[in-house]
Amino acid sequence: LDNQERFRQMVLEEKAEQEARLVTEGHHVVNTRLRAHFNEADWAAEQMSGVSYHGFLHQLIQAVDTDWPTVLATLGQIRRILFNRNAMLCNVTLDEANWTHFEPKLAAFLDTLPAAPLRLAEWSAQYGPGFEGMTIPTQVNYVGKGTNLYKLGYKLHGSAVVITKYLRNTWLWDRVRVQGGAYGGFCLFDHRSGIFSYLSYRDPNLLTTLDNYDWASQFLHQLELNKDELTKGIIGAIADMDAYQLPDAKGYTSMLRYLIGDTDQARQRMRDEILSTTPADFRAFADVLDQVNDKGLVVVLGSQAAIEAANAARQGWLNVFKVL
């Protein structure tokens, strides 16, 4: 940690990777920024991996050059926080016979690490303006719109998994990708946080895409879903939920479920609700999406010309700033 030049190179490499990601994974960047407006966990995720993190890297490079002792002290503090056996959770995946041989070695290793009292960090989340236009040197856009459905009164039902997958594969595919010319159009629903997002990838449009998002609820209202389509949708949702995993992935998934309190009973309830999805559930979900049209926030990453034109067309509704 005390090699200033080596650390500077690491920061520069990280900055270059983040800048490349703005173009190659712009829809993820937009979704991270969008979600950051709704809860502390997603705000923290954006601070550590989103546009805010990119800005932090700029500041860190300057600090390495002008105030290296402070940077070095901060790195030491991070090391002390991370290497604390009282704060560690170990995830090991292996058969029972080998665990009896491995467990003593793991315990011996953990005993070599420092032990300190746990101190939970106090975060002060600062939620920015809800409508943002972030400009980068590109000819395409990444358009996002979303909100927290639970705050709109939606009660979780497993049918949402079927409906959002169907919406991705039909309306958004046809209107945003095929007719609109984008490389991708998506919608995502995080049933733990309640956040629903519309997203586009390498999109030549902006306002037209937002209109297509808003018309999605009307598409569901008018949908005449036959039994075969519904069955295919249910099968696809169950396949995603119970996808095959290798042992290492099973172990990691088990750890995540432990951390967030996801139980077998909750997952079975979700399966049962997916399997019992009906056309009426589609119409009920459309009622919720009607509210997203008016109450959803918008985040766009893309062309300065496109963002400024959209901002002028809707009288300065976006907070526009340059990222690159």
Image (spheres, rainbow, N blue to C red):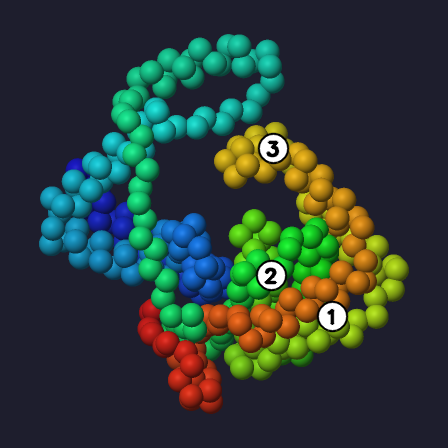
In the picture of the structure, the residue carrying the numbered disc 1 is 220
Which x, y percent locates residue 314?
46, 87
Q: Amino acid at mark 3?
A: Lys
Q: Amino acid at mark 1?
A: Leu
Q: Amino acid at mark 2?
A: Gly
Q: At 36% across and 29% down in the image, what residue appears?
A: 87
Q: Tell me the crowding category of disc 2: few under 14, some 14 to 19, or many 20 or more residues within 10 angstroms, Cα based.
A: few
Which dot, 3 or 2, sits closer to the camera? 2
Which dot, 2 or 1, sits closer to the camera? 2
Sequence-wise, which precedes: disc 3 or disc 1? Answer: 1
In what quadrant of the picture does the N terminus appear? top left
Using the image, determine if residue 47 lies above or below residue 176: above
In the picture of the structure, the residue carrying the numbered disc 2 is 153
Sequence-wise, which precedes: disc 3 or disc 2? Answer: 2
Using the image, determine if residue 44 lies above or below residue 151: above
Secondary structure of the residue carrying tag 2 is loop
Q: Is residue 17 visible?
A: no
Which dot, 3 or 1, sits closer to the camera? 1
Which x, y percent locates residue 306?
45, 82
Using the image, determine if residue 11 lies above or below residue 223: above
In the picture of the structure, the residue carrying the numbered disc 3 is 250
